[in-house]
Amino acid sequence: MKFLLHKSLAVYLIFLIAVVWGGFCFFNIPVSLLPNIEKPAIQIKINYPNHAAQSVESNVTKIIREGISSVGSIKSIESESYSHFALVNLSYEFGTNMSDEFIKLNERIDQLLPDLPSDFIRPQLIKQNVSDVPIVNLQITPQVGIDLLEASDITLQLIKRRIEKIEGVSLVDINGLKTRSVRIILDKTKIRYLGLEEQKIRETVQTSGSSSGALTVKDGNYSYLVKMANNISDIDHLKDISIRLENNRVISLRDIAKIESVADQEVGKHLFNNDEAIVLAIHKQANARMNEVIQSVHDELDLIRKDYNKLNFDLTQDQTYLLNAGIENLTQDLIYGGILCVLLLFLFVNNISSPVLMGISIPISLLLTFICFYYFKISFNIISLSGLALGIGMLIDNSIVVIDSISRNYLDFDLEEACIKGAGEVFVPVLSQVLSTIVIYAPLIYLSGIAGELIYDQAIALTISLFVSLFVAFILTPVLFYSFNARSKKRIKSGQETFVFKFIMRFYDVLFEVIFRNRRKFVLGILILIPLGYLIAVRIPIRIMPQFEENETSVNIDWNEPVGIQENENRINELSKLLHGVVHWEADIGISDFMIDIKRRNINSSDIYYKCTDTKSKNVLDKKLSTYFNENYPNAFIKISGAKNAFTHLFENDEPQMEIRFRQDAFLDSGDSENNVQLVKNALPELKWENSSNLSKVTNVDLHLNERKLSSYQLEKSDVIHQLKSIFNDSEKIKFTGNGDVFTSQIVDTASLIQKFKISYLKNSNDGYFQLQNFVSYDYSDEDQSISADKFGYYKSIFINEKPKGFNIDKIQKQLNELIESKNLNASLTGAFKAEKEIKKDLFIVVILSLILLFALLAIQFDNFLHPFVVMSSLPCALFGSFFTLWIMGGEFDIMAGIGIIVVLGIIVDDPTLKVETVNRLIKEAKTQGRNIDRENLISLLHDAGRICLKPLIMVSLTTTLALVPVYFSHGIGNDIQRNFVSVVVGGLSLGTILSFCFIPLVYYAVTKKNL
């Protein structure tokens, strides 16, 4: 220390370089809403068009599900098979290397492909991440004079590519495009008159569009690639395709068919404010600064608007709203908290140097912290900045203790010795305080799930803050104090205190005397707070994840009816009349074209998003929509929730609160599932049970071929199938490539379904014609809408979507388990309630481990087991303060509040540790001076230790709490997430400090007096 005091210039230059480097790091740290956490989930999207749910399950889903079940470290596997498609959702433990799992799954899928149908397209694997959520959506709507087909061409060929070139953009996903297709409508009367077969025409068209490959021909020293040129480059060339008749006469395709360019058949649409539109979902790179990427998008969009003035462009679901409301709020909290801390010092310190030193140390400490952020690859996000918001008070806590110790020693020693002696006296207790706070965080790594992942950034941020604070307090602060006072002619005098602190000191003297005069009453009063705190704690509502105010809503709709795209759109337009007061709304109808889309979508489903002006109007509109669906579409499956963003994507849990799964031996064997469902509903009628889609039925048309009759008339079954495909416009699409573009054509029939059967004929080998309807019959059947399975097999289920108010979830679980056992039901319980129990269990274990580690650290410091007990007796006081404040503020005990409890346990022991260390030092000095320590002297020494520690104790507690107080007076997602955390910390440190301030001397006296 002496060396540093005499080399102050070197110290200042080193810190100046570090500050400049910290400024550089500050502008290069990525900015995002949340840490870049991989969600431990992979989804397999299976497309198997024109196959019923049973066919999809038996031919594809089952093979894939069973084939991948043993790959990697899969925690759970869930599959849902529907008509045309299926979804397989895989979940893993947090911390799993998802890149390795993704590679293993892809390899296994490749191995399974030979076992799958020949016409099956390889499934799509989606690895979920926070960056899967687009940072903004670009809505494109055509104006009068331009149709959506032309707008689609411009968007796909030009606009999308310009957005993709923006630095920081990783992907531009697209939905709502309309594609062109050539429709060939055959004149069946002419065909039959000319003796042509549809299959022959189809083969001729297909042959004309196919490539014959290429040959390499060597000519001397040169080699050439020889290929047959494709003459079909546009619709006119298609019309001129030659078709040879049996009499060798050649006709063109235009002679027997109507050929026209039309929009391709739609399986999905996108609407924006009642207009059909195209949407571009813009994703950013993981390490890009979100605000800079969004600004670049705005700049490029200004140029695009000038180039394409016949299109309207609107940006929606801008994630910078959350970024500004979250990170900027927390940044303001840091600034306001720091200012409040410095202003507070003027109330307790009667000289300008100490507050000035604090004002210097805060920005220096922050800039040094940014260096660590940069090299630890920690981004500025809500979680890491919350750690800084907590650490801002701690950044100056250590400096406060050091300055106070140096100031006291400066009363009796010269400046240099006071700096050396003052810093040395408090080094051990301050180091112990830092280590106790860090040690208390160590068991948090035991937390499972998202909580354990999130706490990493907060723990690292807080740990960095504490070590930087320690470094600044014992390296820079003594040197600054020495330099300030060496040039000052005024010397700190005894009794030179502020009016505020003198008043507090007099109050302390009176309070100390009253406490020791009524020791038993005070001990009894504080002990009563323990059961009182428990009673308060059990009254606080419990939830896993924190709530925050929203003004955006997402509505997921499954009509649970076989509606087509047009009827789906009509229903959405009718529903949109309720949305007249919103800022804007958009809807994805049917099957989307998004590459990254983990939602379950089919023709009869829709997703609506709308943004309201405030939270109140959002809640009102949500209720209106819920009532609308209940009255008009009671059988539809509806989910109304907050709009998807990076935060909800990470925290969302699609599991219902509780689900009962009734097991089946096979998906076609429903067994007693429906009877069992009704049995459970009757047993607990007060609960709002809902049916899963696997209990719903859909009506299908079953076609039956009379094969015996076909054989008797010498007709081929394959010809019938080709004819049926033509009737249902399901014939194979034929691709043509020309002039760099690809267009498709399809032979279709525009007649009504009944008319198609009447005018469709089959031709046998003897040139005989027979009506198709004579060989085909049909009937209707009801089949499962979906087929659900997990790693234990097939099931049907009912669920409770929300935690029932007024019901104990544990009691409900017990009742259901007893019912399942008594009725011998083949059923099991699952749902979000299991995760809640796991979180509670983890938090309990974390608290126990934290207390054990804390006790061990204190035992090492004091070299006995008695004084750690004295210090830790402050914990019940802190817990009472935390629960009382959380209850008064109307908060909920969520995972952030639980983390706050852990933080309080680590910080609250700092002041008792310093006080016990000071008492021990005073007793040691008294014994060195030959004084006898009796009970009266012990009380006197406890009183003196309290006076010595009073100023740093009050300032440390107030600075830490005041640094967090601005969260209460600001709004935004960042503050909403941290509000329960702040309530717990502020209550624990304020009320806890006051109570432990009275209690610790009594406990120390009680355990020490017997040895006197």
Image (cartoon, rainbow, N blue to C red):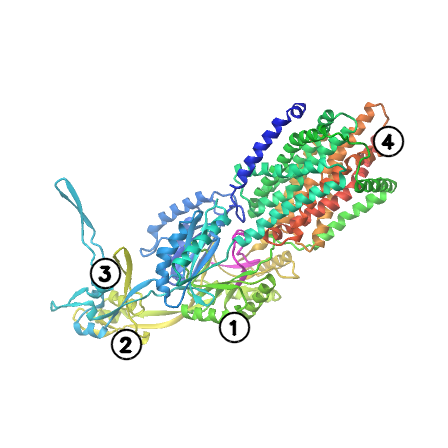
* Direction from residue 1012 to residue 884 in the image, left or right: left
Q: Position of residue 321 (x, y in %)?
A: 54, 54
Q: Nearer the viewer, residue 734 or 414?
A: 414
Tell me which residue sits at (36%, 53%) in the image.
122
Q: Residues within 10 Å of mark 4 (few under 14, many from 20)?
A: some
Sooner in the amino-acid sequence: mark 1 or mark 4: 1
Label placed on residue 758? 2
Spatial CA span between label 1 and label 4: 83 Å
Instruction: Please tell me whether mark 3 sits on a helix, a strand or a loop.
Output: helix
Sooner in the amino-acid sequence: mark 2 or mark 1: 1
- Which region is colored magenta? 639-666
In this figure, which residue is indicated by the disc labeled 4? 937
Residues at circles 1 and 3 in contact by the CB criterion of under 8 Å: no
* Direction from residue 75 to residue 540 in the image, left or right: right
Sooner in the amino-acid sequence: mark 1 or mark 3: 3
Q: Position of residue 459 (x, y in %)?
A: 60, 41
Give the amino acid type for the residue marked by disc 2 in the picture. Lys
Q: Would residue 215 be visible to someone looking at this image? A: yes
Label placed on residue 206? 3
Sooner in the amino-acid sequence: mark 3 or mark 2: 3
Q: Nearer the viewer, residue 307 or 881?
A: 307
